[in-house]
């Protein structure tokens, strides 16, 4: 985020980073609502939401399942970084929605800053680790004992 701010200042652009986490979530929610609920051409709209935020994912699922979304669920995709927010990915898949995991690759000196930024941006998502462990244990038990 420091790099983006420095670059924007150097080029005379407005700061591209939201001032705080709450503003970032509010902006994301507004964009999501705009695409799903107020799309002027829903038949040509196929949004892909990349989020580790449980509230954002829950909101999108709610809009899709309630019928409030003009865009049908078969045209919507969700994505998360492999190893983060797996409980959200499982929930999306269980609801019949398209969920994808991505794996960044490349030279270590290029990939690590990206991964560190994702961890910084998604520090609240890392709090879901206990839930993910509990879900995995429950799945292991289900598979072993029926």
Image (tube, grey):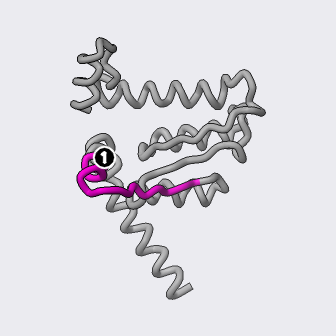
Figure check: 139 above or below 15: below
Secondary structure beneath disc 1?
Answer: helix
Q: Is residue 13 above or below residue 49?
A: above
- Quarter of the rendering occupied by the N terminus: top left
**Residue 81 locus on image (x, y percent):** 42, 53
Give me the residue at 29% from left, 16% from top: 11
Q: Is residue 82 left or right of residue 41?
A: left
Q: Where is residue 7? Give x, y as percent.
A: 27, 24
Please state the total of marks drawn on the protein image: 1
Is 95 or 108 nearer to us in this picture?
Answer: 108
Give the camera-side residue of 140 and 23: 23
Using the image, determine if residue 69 lies above or below residue 132. Answer: above
Q: Nearer the viewer, residue 10 or 100?
A: 10
Q: In the image as oriented, which residue stretches furthest toward the top?
A: 12
Which of the image's four quarters has the C terminus? bottom right
Looking at the image, which residue is at 33% across and 59% down?
129
Residue 106 drawn in magenta: yes
Rendering coords of residue 111 (x, y %): 30, 52
User: Which quadrant of the figure has residue 72?
Assistant: top right
Few, some or many residues within 10 Å of mark 1 (<14, 14–19, 20+): few
In the image, residue 77 lies in the stretch drawn in magenta: no
* Residue that mark 1 sits on: 114
Q: For the point 70% across and 43% down, which residue is it?
A: 75
Q: Considering only vertical position in the picture, is 48 above or below 8?
A: below
**Measured from the top left, where is residue 78 in percent x and y?**
55, 47
Q: Residue furthest bottom?
A: 145
Residue ID at (46%, 43%)? 51
Q: Quadrant of residue 106?
A: bottom left
Which region is colored magenta? 99-115
């Amino acid at each position: 985020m420091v790099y983006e701010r420095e670059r924007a200042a150097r080029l005379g652009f407005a700061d591209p980073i939201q001032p705080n986490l709450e503003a970032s979530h509010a902006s994301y929610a507004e964009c999501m609502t705009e695409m799903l609920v107020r799309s002027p051409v829903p038949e040509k709209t196929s949004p892909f939401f990349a989020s580790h935020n449980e509230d954002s994912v829950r909101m999108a699922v709610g809009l899709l399942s309630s019928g409030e979304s003009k865009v049908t669920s078969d045209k919507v995709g969700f994505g998360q970084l492999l190893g983060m927010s797996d409980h959200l990915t499982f929930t999306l898949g269980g609801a019949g929605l398209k969920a994808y995991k991505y794996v960044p690759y490349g030279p270590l000196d290029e990939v690590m800053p990206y991964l560190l930024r994702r961890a910084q941006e998604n520090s609240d998502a890392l709090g879901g680790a206990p839930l993910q462990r509990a879900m995995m244990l429950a799945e292991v038990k289900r598979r072993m004992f029926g």
